[in-house]
Amino acid sequence: MLKSFEQKLKNQDLSARTISGYLTDILFFKKWAAQIYGKEVPFSQIVKEDIKAFRQDLLTIKRQKATSINRRLQSLKRFFDWAHRDKRIKTNPCISVRFVRIQRSNQPHSLNKKEVHALLRAAGQSKHGLATRNYAFIQLALQTGMRIGEIVKLQFRDLSIQERIGSVRVIDGKGIRERKVPLNATARRALSAYLKEKNLQPDDFVFLTKRGKPVTIRGLQFVVQTLGGKAHIKRVKLTAHILRHTFAMNFLQANEGKLVELASLLGHESLNTTAIYTRSSEESLAKSIENIETNIYDAAS
């Protein structure tokens, strides 16, 4: 049954990493069930109580994080939903099984203005002839919110840069969907300065190594970490995804309430994903509490 499910996922053009994650979670549950019953249990004999017991065991005994538990439950839900629709099992044990509730108040980590300036300064001071490349890469990430995997795959023909307008055609990680993201003046200037140093053909990748080879995801992650060290950014563990978060936070600060537009720019399929950027940070929550105390004090004086 698991082999058929794997083939179903492949037919849906999911990435190998995503498929592997689903299968790993399902096998983890199967092993858990075998330990509980003392023997291997066919998927057709799994009932709702088993799924609930699994959830409770992960939460209270194994002390796994709620996000990890919910990921495993989501994998099981997808598997048993498919098995039930395909008439491989009579009843779906995952129906009405709830995810672990997560109390979230924090926004994703992002850089403040001081850290952004320090990072850009470090990028512009890169050695070995990589200053304009690194600066253009950092600005592109900060001004568009593109994923690092999307930046790596960016080809010269995907860019449209004019004096007063510009855009980039972004292909998602699976190469199926695409979106068009505007380039503001800051991004256009940084990219133009970098492209002047190159003689790229339409099919050429935009970001290259010193030897003229296309950069890799690992390579750009290393660039981000190195520049973060030179910029003395210690408040957050700097990754390329932090740059994406920074773009999203800055966008909503400048365009309050425009969640649909942000979702389109980021390539999110669900607004629930984009909504994480609307949560209050610890700093803003603390400030709100301070305001309450101040208002009460002022009223009494």
Image (tube, rainbow, N blue to C red):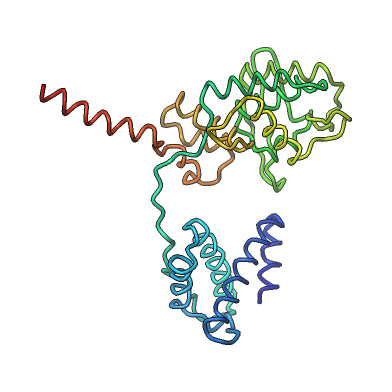
Percent of width and height locating residue 234 = 56, 32
Residue found at x 58% / y 35%: 242
**Residue most extreme to the right:** 211
Percent of width and height locating residue 292 = 22, 31
Left or right: 182 with respect to 113? right
Q: Nearer the viewer, residue 21 or 154?
A: 21
Percent of width and height locating residue 79 = 58, 69
Residue found at x 16% / y 26%: 297
Residue found at x 86% / y 27%: 201
Q: Nearer the viewer, residue 67 or 191?
A: 67
The answer to which image quadrant residue 166 occupies is: top right
Residue found at x 73% / y 25%: 134
**Residue most extreme to the top:** 163
Left or right: 88 with respect to 294? right
The answer to which image quadrant residue 86 occupies is: bottom right
The answer to which image quadrant residue 15 occupies is: bottom right
Q: Nearer the viewer, residue 282 or 50?
A: 282
